[in-house]
Image: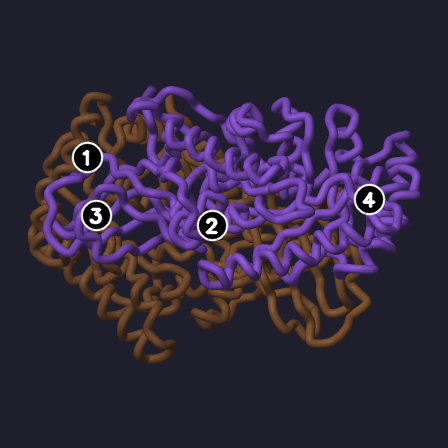
Chain colours: A brown, B purple
Amino acid sequence: MQLCTPTLTLDLDAFDRNVARMARTIARGGKHWRPHVKSIRSPALARRLLAAGARGVTCATLDEAKVMVEGGVDDVLVASQVVQALEIQQLLDLNRRARVMVAVDSLAQGLLLARYARHAGLAVPVLIEVEVGLGRAGVTPGPAVVDLARRLAHEGGLHFEGLMAWEGHATRVAAGGARRQAIADAVGLLTESARLCAAASVPPGTVSCGGTGTFETTSTLDGVTEIQAGGGVFGDLRCREDFGIDLEAALGLRASVISRPTPTRIVCNAGWKSLAVHPKPPRPSGLEGVAGMAHAASHLTIDLAGALVRPDIGDCIDLEVGYADATVFLHREIVGLRDLQAEERFTLPDTRPPPAR
Amino acid sequence: MQLCTPTLTLDLDAFDRNVARMARTIARGGKHWRPHVKSIRSPALARRLLAAGARGVTCATLDEAKVMVEGGVDDVLVASQVVQALEIQQLLDLNRRARVMVAVDSLAQGLLLARYARHAGLAVPVLIEVEVGLGRAGVTPGPAVVDLARRLAHEGGLHFEGLMAWEGHATRVAAGGARRQAIADAVGLLTESARLCAAASVPPGTVSCGGTGTFETTSTLDGVTEIQAGGGVFGDLRCREDFGIDLEAALGLRASVISRPTPTRIVCNAGWKSLAVHPKPPRPSGLEGVAGMAHAASHLTIDLAGALVRPDIGDCIDLEVGYADATVFLHREIVGLRDLQAEERFTLPDTRPPPAR
């Protein structure tokens, strides 16, 4: 197999160990695992997580869910609100082939969905999204959740499955006890809402939360039934360094050196159109004395503290990915490596927004 | 035509006026126009610039050049170094169908290209890239440029066409006289190198430079023959506000409101996977009292200073694009609007890095 750069590479052994480690942590807490696949994207890779014990997957958008269902995944949560008529129709179509839950956070949106679903003769499984401090979507914790749960539970066309939340704001708290407490406080709003629902005879079967930055804590919290952490399987710099999670670097980008204008400068074809810089920049692997990097659309310039002869023009250079979620979606495939040799190719779907009709 | 959000929209009247204005400024300076299409991407849109007087286009990568040649553009500059064997072969193939120049900045790279070209019975047109202060690729201005020009001019398989540079570092200087001077100083290194080449009997037919942030100045500089500014035709916030160029907002993103968790919060489906935040964030159009925005992969949260009833769930919201180059490549098409109605669709190529072979 001849790699054409820039190309994503995946150390399959490291990936499989990361999958096993996340699965173990979550199972030890007695939780189900529904990994978020917004960064994973490939159904073939997602199936490796399912084989390791995941019960299904979480997606950010309906398009991502379509790819997963078409790739054979039969239990999917769309962790956002689906409100466009075309998308609601697609959600219903998917529900004829698989279990595809969706997040609801208002009565208006729930009733809209219910109306379409009844018309199609279906009952769509829904989770109520609870706003636990991130400041995005979701119902205010407490009585408002109970009220909505009651309405949705008795609405034809819907099947009330439970609650979900994303406590992502807690990852911005300094690591250690303070962060663990912030996670517990946020998730407490979710689990207390679940308790109130149960007391009001609308018991949530599922209480879902947790991302890569929080799963080590959320996996230990009472009342949580399901963990959504997924992207950590790539072991990017963000999860290892910013979140301090003990995972291995698995995802890399292989680039080609296209210019060596001076002995202390390397220019390669790894600009931000193939390798994200935000929220965490990438890092060259095995290159000593990196003094600075400049990121352009299609160029990455690496300035060195001292002169180096290699890598020369045409040589390859490997980089650790800073943030997998902002990088994988820019690619057409990931090349899986075993013992440094290309072993398997994972095709990535074209999930650019769909065209007008 | 039913738009499915998020979708890029283009005000065709504003776009055409921007094209005309850029063409006029460049023509007034007596320069040719070879707009960079790394952000434009659609051959159909590029042809509108050619119809307005552009002599050809500039691309950042070989893949972009392929799309342009396949879309009927017959004069292309690849403004970076092509060093991979597969890509060199593709460059040669393209040169059987169109004039596709490429940037060279070292003898080693030039000789590699020449060897392949001779083997194919072709002469590839090349420009020497000169490093005028950006700190990326390029030959040191002055005698080193002359030396390389002499070697390339007499090397079978190559056709020495001239010089190019990108003075992008000058856009970081404060606007006004200081920036104009910084641009003139940088471009002076290019034009002086061209003069030395001419004196050494290797006269550059083309002296090419200038981006959207600099073209108003570079168009006036002696010795420059060709201007590469292109992305300005979209009139994004970066070019209008950061670079202070008098162009109109033409490119927008239409999103759908998916949640209104509170009267002062709007959540829409315009995350950074469809609408870039760096180096310039987008901005909601026609929405009063925006107090803050939070960007996630597939969500954009807008916090308002005061309560608003509209837009409600399911309503559309338009945003001005912050930086077109970091946004257009995330999409499958641009919908051209005339009098607010969808008039024409511009398909965007899938230029994610090519798969392994």
What residue does disc 4 label?
Answer: B203
What residue does disc 3 label?
Answer: B266
What residue does disc 2 label?
Answer: A39
Q: Earlier in the sequence, mark 3 or mark 4?
A: 4
Dot 1 and dot 2 within a common chain = yes
Residue A88's spot in the image, x, y percent?
28, 30
Mark 1 and 4 residues: CB-CB less than 8 Å, in contact?
A: no
Which is more foreground, mark 1 or mark 4?
4
Q: How far apart, in angstroms, are the residues tagged by discs 1 and 3?
A: 25 Å
Q: How far apart, in angstroms, are the residues tagged by discs 4 and 2?
A: 51 Å
In the displayed structure, B84 sits above or below B142; it is above
State the count of labels: 4
User: Left of B238 or right of it: where is A281?
Assistant: right
What residue does disc 1 label?
Answer: A158
| Image quadrant where one finds the N terminus of chain B | top left
Give the secondary structure at mark 4.
Answer: loop
